[in-house]
Image: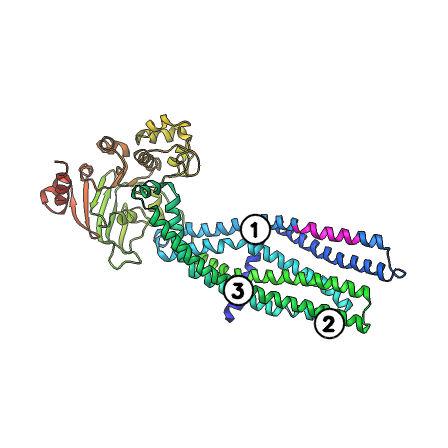
């Protein structure tokens, strides 16, 4: 409890710095509006005093009734006009703060290595931050500015009341103690509620993606599964509503108690003014001005307490955001692209996922020579893709070594020197040019370079049919672009791999979506396609691996056989068994 109390001011101060760094000029403008609001409120009290003097003591009044009323009308209009200006400025500043916070989250996710990013804990923390912390910047911005304006208003109105009767100020300020305590209670319940419902929100969002996004539409309709998924979505909605109803009732109780406290303080202050007039300690003009000041001070106190409540409520979510950002590893150094003059060697390499007991890759030895095509085969779950990620530098081996031309290779250098296209490659909702050139941001995507790899990957036929050629937008999720077939998308992914000029290419099922003719054309001259590069080819179709210089056969995370196709068939082992089973289907 003590740690939370001491951490809250630090988090609020950090939030204030974030607001200022996001938009310094916008923060200054917002602060000016707050000052103008406080000055205008003070002007209303002063003009009100002039009106009461002109009405009740005209012979002693400094100005006449008409000028006093005009002054009161002007100051009241000024007070009313500042509020919409503040609202729009807060809106702009909130957007700038939101952008800055998003940048921090994106920096953290970009720094996370693949093992961290794929872990359940990281995914849950990211989802919680996205659901809660990222919705808080506008609240924090508005609360900080509201607190600033409230403090200025309280100071000016308190000065007025002290000049009339100092006793009125502590009566109103006393309402702040329960209001702050109630705000702390509200912040704890809100954070506990959000933490408890993160898993429900994640499951519900996943179902919404299934039910609304195009990639899933055909299968859901083919299976008639939209109904059952809608039922599950409805169940989750009911669970969320039940939990939310309880939280809303708690917040309504807190709001009611806060309102009662402020109302009691305001009533006590007004009764005190009546008693002061009755005893003759203040006159009627002073009493009228004091009543206006009490009302305005009550409003400023309400603004201040509401702002404090907003900051206290946001503090746990800001702490969650800070923990998430701090949990990210430091930025990895940029890798240096290397040429492969001899070979890449993995010796006694093992890797186990954090949530798993059995290693996904266990004491594996493989090598890929310069200009060689090496195949990796095995049944599903044998560890092929995990090993490919180690080869590509996306995973670091937990034991063993990875050597590039005889020297231990750091992961950043390996990633810069290897191109990977996985079976579940990304279909970017971008132009065809950007879909290809996104693999290498270090050079300008000229027509010559893009068309060259498009030709080698067999994409030119699709380009000729596109309205704007390589500048045609692909996909229909964001724009009304051109939609390609599965095989055409696979060729685009292959062109993407060829565009990135690296010494080694990892191709995970590069022909999974191709028809037999296109697959034959691809593998008939794969060496010419690679243009001298080394390649690690992963495929379930053993007919495509026959051309490899060397074939590694994996089973349960281990390499159980190695050799050429003919050598492995002669050995009559695991490879020969799988090859025979597969080829029998074509007889």
Q: Is residue 70 above or below residue 489?
A: below
User: Which badge, 3 or 1, comes first in the chain's sequence?
Assistant: 1
**Residue at mark 3:** 186
Q: Quadrant of the C terminus?
A: top left
Mark in the foreground, 1 or 2: 2
Mark pair 3, 2: CA separation? 31 Å
Tell me, yes or no, whether the highlighted magenta stretch contains residue 64. no
Q: Is residue 161 above or below residue 519?
A: below
Relative side of 365 to 315, left or right: left
Mark pair 1, 2: CA separation? 39 Å
- Is residue 570 in view? yes
Relative side of 162 to 119, left or right: right
Give the extent of the magenta segment: 71-83
Residue 329 location, x and y as percent? Answer: 41, 55
User: Which badge, 1 or 2, comes first in the chain's sequence?
Assistant: 1
**Residue at mark 2:** 167
| Mark 2 closeness class: few <14, some 14–19, many ≥20 residues within 10 Å | few
């Amino acid at each position: 409890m003590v740690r939370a109390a001491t951490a809250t001011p630090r988090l609020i101060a950090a939030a204030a710095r974030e607001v200022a760094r996001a938009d310094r000029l916008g923060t200054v403008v917002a602060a000016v509006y707050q000052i103008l609001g406080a000055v205008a409120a003070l002007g209303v009290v002063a003009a009100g005093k002039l009106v009461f003097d002109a009405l009740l003591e005209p012979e002693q009044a400094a100005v006449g009734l008409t000028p006093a009323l005009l002054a009161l009308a002007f100051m009241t209009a000024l007070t009313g006009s500042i509020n919409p200006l503040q609202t729009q400025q807060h809106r702009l500043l909130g957007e700038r703060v939101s952008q800055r916070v998003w940048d921090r989250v994106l920096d953290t996710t970009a720094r996370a290595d693949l093992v961290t990013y794929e872990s359940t804990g990281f995914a849950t923390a990211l989802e919680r931050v996205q659901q809660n912390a990222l919705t808080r910047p506008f609240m924090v911005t508005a609360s900080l500015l509201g607190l600033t304006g409230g403090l200025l208003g309280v100071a000016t109105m308190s000065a007025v009341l002290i000049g009339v009767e100092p006793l009125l100020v502590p009566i109103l300020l006393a309402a702040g103690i329960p209001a702050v305590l109630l705000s702390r209670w509200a912040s704890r319940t809100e954070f506990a509620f959000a933490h408890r419902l993160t898993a429900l929100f994640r499951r519900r969002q996943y179902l919404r993606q299934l039910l609304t996004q195009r990639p899933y539409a055909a299968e859901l309709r083919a299976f008639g599964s939209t109904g059952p998924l809608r039922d599950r979505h409805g169940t989750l909605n009911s669970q969320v509503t039940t939990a939310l109803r309880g939280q809303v009732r708690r917040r309504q109780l807190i709001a009611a108690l806060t309102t009662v406290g402020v109302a009691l303080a305001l009533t006590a202050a007004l009764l005190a003014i009546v008693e002061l007039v009755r005893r003759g300690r203040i006159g009627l003009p002073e009493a009228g001005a004091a009543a206006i000041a009490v009302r305005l001070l009550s409003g400023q106190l309400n603004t201040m307490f509401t702002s404090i409540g907003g900051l206290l409520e946001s503090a746990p979510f800001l702490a969650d955001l800070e923990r998430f950002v701090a949990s990210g590893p430091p930025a990895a150094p940029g890798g240096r692209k290397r040429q492969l003059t001899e070979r890449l060697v993995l010796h006694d390499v093992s890797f186990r996922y954090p949530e798993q007991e059995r290693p996904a890759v266990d004491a594996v030895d493989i090598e890929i020579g310069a200009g060689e095509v090496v195949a990796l085969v095995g049944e599903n779950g044998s560890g092929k893709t995990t090993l490919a990620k180690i080869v590509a530098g996306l995973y670091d081996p937990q034991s063993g070594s990875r050597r590039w031309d005889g020297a231990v290779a750091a992961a950043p250098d390996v990633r810069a020197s290897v191109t990977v296209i996985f079976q579940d490659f990304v279909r970017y909702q971008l132009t065809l040019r950007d879909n290809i050139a996104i693999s290498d941001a270090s050079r300008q995507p000229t027509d010559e370079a893009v068309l060259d790899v498009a030709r080698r990957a067999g994409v030119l036929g699709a380009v000729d049919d596109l309205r704007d050629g390589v500048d045609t937008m692909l996909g229909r999720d964001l724009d009304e672009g051109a939609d390609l077939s599965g095989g055409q998308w696979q060729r685009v992914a292959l062109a993407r791999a060829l565009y990135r000029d690296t010494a080694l290419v990892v191709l995970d099922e590069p022909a999974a979506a191709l028809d037999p003719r296109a697959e034959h054309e691809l593998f008939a001259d794969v060496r010419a396609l690679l243009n001298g590069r080394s390649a690690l080819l992963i495929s379930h179709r053993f007919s495509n691996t026959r051309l490899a210089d060397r074939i590694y056969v994996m089973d349960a995370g281990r390499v159980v056989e190695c050799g050429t196709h003919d050598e492995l068939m002669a050995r009559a082992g695991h490879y020969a068994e799988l090859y025979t089973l597969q080829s029998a289907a074509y007889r």
